[in-house]
Amino acid sequence: MVPVTIPRSAAAARNEVEGQQAAPKSDDFFPVAVWYGGGTARAPMMSPLDAQSAAEWGHDLDQIKATGFNTVKCWVDWATAEPQPGVFDFDNLDLLMKLAGERGLRVIVQIYTDSAPDWVGIRYPDGRFVDRSGAVITSQSAPGYCIDHAGVRDEIVKFLGALSRRANQYPALYGWDVWSEPHVINWADFPYLPDAEFCFCASSQARFRQWLRDKYKTLDSLNAAWYRRFTSWDEVQPPRFSTILSYADYMDWRAFIDDKLAGDLKTRVDAIRGADTTHPITSHAAAPGLFTSPADGYGEPDDWKMSASADFFGTSLYPKHSESTRPWSYWMLAAGLDFTRSAGHAFGKGFWIGELQAGQGATGMRIVEPVTAHDEEYWMWQAISHGAREIAVYAWYPMSSGFESNGYGLIDLDGTLTDRARAAGRSAQAIERNATGLNQAQPAPAHVAILYDRLSYLVGGSQSTLSTLGNAERDSLEGIYRAFFEQQIPVDFVHSPALDPHRLAQYKILFLPYPVMLSESVGAAVKQYIADGGTVVAEARLAWNNERGFASAVIPGFGFDQIFGAREELIQPQDDPKLVIQDAAGLPGLKPGDTATAAAFEEDLEPLSGSRVLASFPNGKAAMVEKAYGQGHAVLIGSFAGLAYQRKHDASTARLIESVAEAAGVERQVQASGTGTSELEVRRLVAGDEEFAFVFNHGSGPADASIAMRLPWTAKAFDLVSEEVVPVQRNGGDSILHKKLEPGAIWVVRLREQ
């Protein structure tokens, strides 16, 4: 393998792409990919080329296409592709592009700069990552070097530019994924560093200081915010530990990390875009941000900020990963997908599935239950039903080395095709047949919104042990989501920095679960939304702390006591709080004396003028208060209902959550009825004169299902997989589908206006 320096001549490019098939139009093509980098090497390692490579890779690509995939996702790692400064070796990419193009397969290029060439560390010894303890990290094929260092960043940009110019010579190129599972530091663990946190190198500290200059403008303003006495910007450093006085410095550090990761993604996007003005450029998180914490010392990305920095941002999906304590439940998968979808849709964008689990999870001897053919079909259709615009199954071959050896493959390492591969291929073919319609359809609009605010994870600063509630932030979000999910009611997550009263107007109700820390800008947006006619339901200790970690004199803070009609009188821990519905509540489906289960605390509320008490605690104190404000309504719950429903799954809590939404005008657009339908999930994609209905039977028994949907036209329907006609009955304004569904059944129907 002889390294070559690019750019190459136009004649050479023409010779290599000769015989390749033309790319289909974008609306007619839906990329369903499998990860394949040539041979059996696991990403980001590359198989060495020899005289047999073209034949062997061609055989694999023939099998991939015959199985049903229309795209492969290959990878390029920096260490292999630039073994010497300015000398580029793209032989593997050239061969794969050529072979894929000859077969009419498209190619998505995944880039790894975390696997960096050793010469970078030699040239820039001060470009290594530094832990908050001061420990300097020497890269061992990973994690590479810190992009905050100007020299390292310039080398990355030059490499990405060269790669972009090379790949763009091939018509087979479909798009880019420039960053797999972004963190500040990737692909390495440091057991010798307790509570590792990155990066504290001189370059990262300088970048943080500039971020602070942009935010505070003057050193005096920074000193006032941090309770410090700096005399020079050069004295300012990121916080390395907590103090009892203030953690405003830590709040700024975590906000900086969010912005830094989004900025680092934009650097990569811009570098590729310099030579490529047409192909989509993406990145994908290790997991939906719903399941991670912004306090993680390795740096967890903010899905919304990352979505703003690329054409698409997506996620990996490993519902049976070996690192999980148990396989994901069906509602957990739905919540994660809706979370990722919501981040992209906030910017008018779709989302991609960067990695979808293909085979059994294995990390050393931590081997979990096998992935089945049904799992693969189910996960793929779930992604589609949530509006994904691409799926990349990870990977064709199992991992050939490393601590995940023999895990996560769609076929066996000896090349034997599996039932999983056949099932994935069948789904891929059905998706491809309906590409135009799926590309044009969007998830059914939601009238329920849930606020996702990363500040709530940071109460107490870096001292996570200050909470006895575990992952209360995540569970509170999931609990509210789950209550509506089980009633076939679509939900959007909305993000605090992107909160806009005008955009919020599309929702009839906004939930603020676990809202213990909010910024004043979020408070202002929430107030305006209520004044404009929206309904807001907030849980205990609303706006207790502001974005600097300073407590409000009155709880709820920001003047919310006057808007919600109550203030905190007393808060006390309670294992099993109960909310008792009062005579004046008037909540649909609830009568006086009914109780609902909450969690963690009883926050006794003192009702203020103009409010009415909807529920009380058993001690007689107000537990739930409502007040009209402007054209809308504000409801305050003195406990944590979302947390309760997630952890206890008490039907009384769901009834309360749904009742408040019904009172706000939220209606079901889908009704599933019939024997065995209690665990049926129905999702819809809509586009003008057609819709797609996705029905999943999660129950352990068969379901005799009647599914009623409100459509604005008379429909004819087809089974998306079998392409058979599906009868549609009309009952008033409803279109009704009927089918007997076996346990685990997946039914996808395409409905068109007659």
Image (spheres, grey):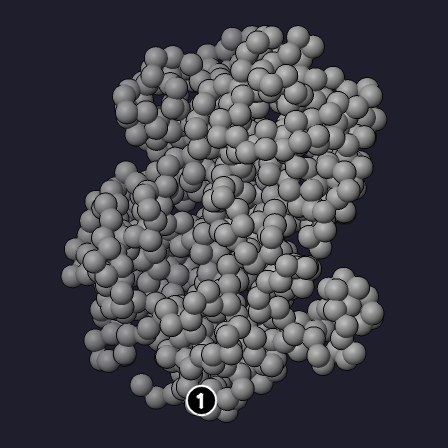
Q: Nearer the viewer, residue 333 or 75?
A: 333
Q: Between residues 367 and 426, which one lies in front from this camera angle?
A: 367
Quadrant including the N terminus: bottom left
Q: Is residue 287 left or right of residue 410?
A: right
* Residue at figure coordinates x 59%, y 62% from the top left: 242
384, above or below 321, in the image: above
Count of labels in the image: 1
Tell me which corner region of the image, top left, top right, bottom left or bottom right, holds residue 375: top left
The residue that label 1 is drawn on is: 119
On the image, the x and y values in percent for residue 555 come to 73, 37
Q: Position of residue 632 (x, y in %)?
A: 77, 25
At x 83%, y 69%, the residue is 220
Q: Secondary structure beneath disc 1?
A: helix
Q: Is residue 454 left or right of residue 544?
A: left
Q: Which amino acid lies under the numbered mark 1 shown in the image of this protein?
A: Trp
Seen from the viewer's position, the closer of residues 148 and 391 is: 148
Task: Tell me the residue at 79%/64% (across/down).
Answer: 224
> Residue visible at 62% across and 68% down?
239
Q: Is residue 306 left or right of residue 173?
A: right
Closer to the camera, 300 or 7? 300
